Image: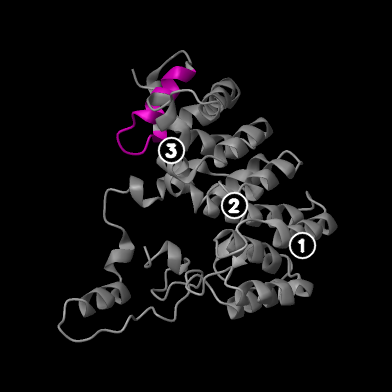
Amino acid sequence: MAIADALDFDVDEVLFDLAEHDGFPRKALEWAIANREAVTPGLLETVEAYVNGSDLDGDDGDAIFFVVHLLAQFREKRAYRPLMRLFSLDSARLYRILGDVTTETLPSIAISVFDGDPRPIQEVIENADSDDYVRSGLFEALAFLVKEGKIDLGEFKKYLLRAYADLRPQGESHVWVGWQSAISMLGLTGFTELVRKAFASGMIHPGTMRFHHFQGDVRAAVRDPESYKVSACVPLGYLDDAIGEMESWAAFSDGPSDRLEREPWEAAVSEFLTDEPHVNPFRDVGRNDPCPCGSGRKFKKCCLQ
């Protein structure tokens, strides 16, 4: 019996439906949201079991993707510390259970469950074995929480300075993209020369972004201090609609991604089908730039994929 049709709640049935879904499990998610108080203990236990090393390659492990989004929508502070332990898993294991959460919704999840103590987030950032995209996204989450008044700005400035001196690796890594994003999002113009040094020393790959992109972002933050955007087209915020967020993902769409139908992509592909030497039409587009197709998303999250 599907959980949506059940008369008596059983969290195991919820987890089974989330793990064994055929398409997007809307009914199971709606049932869980409608029964938040009853469902939450089981969701927390599922995350705890996974991070404690239980063999959850079956139903519960497959359900983790949905579980973390539900806990974020619930603003469940008890999930904060186990989720930070989950986010500190090695890249291969984390991506296997969370997929594109690591580059899409992870900052919003961290923001939504934050319990007031930045140290668990900082521990993930400082762990050189954690996924670099996760570390980067958590820097952005911290900056958002500073803007919300939930973390002291002065203490965060000190943390940014310590990170520059101590964070590993001290060479090229995506974690430094998040570091500079946090600085630009907060409009910290006093850090400009330090960020310039980071770019000049190769800590941020020029194929990802360049120093003038940082300059544009920090100017935008100074002009609009109420903005919660990481860059020109990527806002941060709480995750209030887990169903709406997840259902829009291409993985749950029956049709092909609409970006494949856009003219710039087709034109780029057609160049590779000729015998003539080709020039990359995106050679001057940074990964964090707005996509030239006009989607409004970052290039790295659209036609670069």
* Position of residue 233 in the picture relative to residue 299 (left or right): right
Q: Quadrant of residue 275?
A: bottom left
Expressed as whole percent of the image width and height from the top left, the position of residue 147 reads 75, 58
Q: Earlier in the sequence, mark 2 or mark 3?
A: 3
Answer whether labels 2 and 1 touch (C-beta < 8 Å). no
Relative to the observer, which residue lies in front, 286 or 187?
A: 286
Farthest residue to the right: give it: 154
Farthest residue to the left: give it: 275
Q: Quadrant of residue 110?
A: top right
Quadrant housing the N terminus = top left
Residue annotated with mark 1 = 161
Residue annotated with mark 2 = 135
Q: Please state the total of marks drawn on the protein image.
A: 3
Answer whether labels 1 and 3 touch (C-beta < 8 Å). no
Q: In terms of secondary structure, what is the magenta stretch mainly?
A: helix
Relative to the observer, which residue lies in front, 133 or 69?
A: 133
Residue 254 visible to an observer of this rendering = yes
Q: Mark 1: which secondary structure?
A: helix
Q: Amino acid at mark 2?
A: Arg
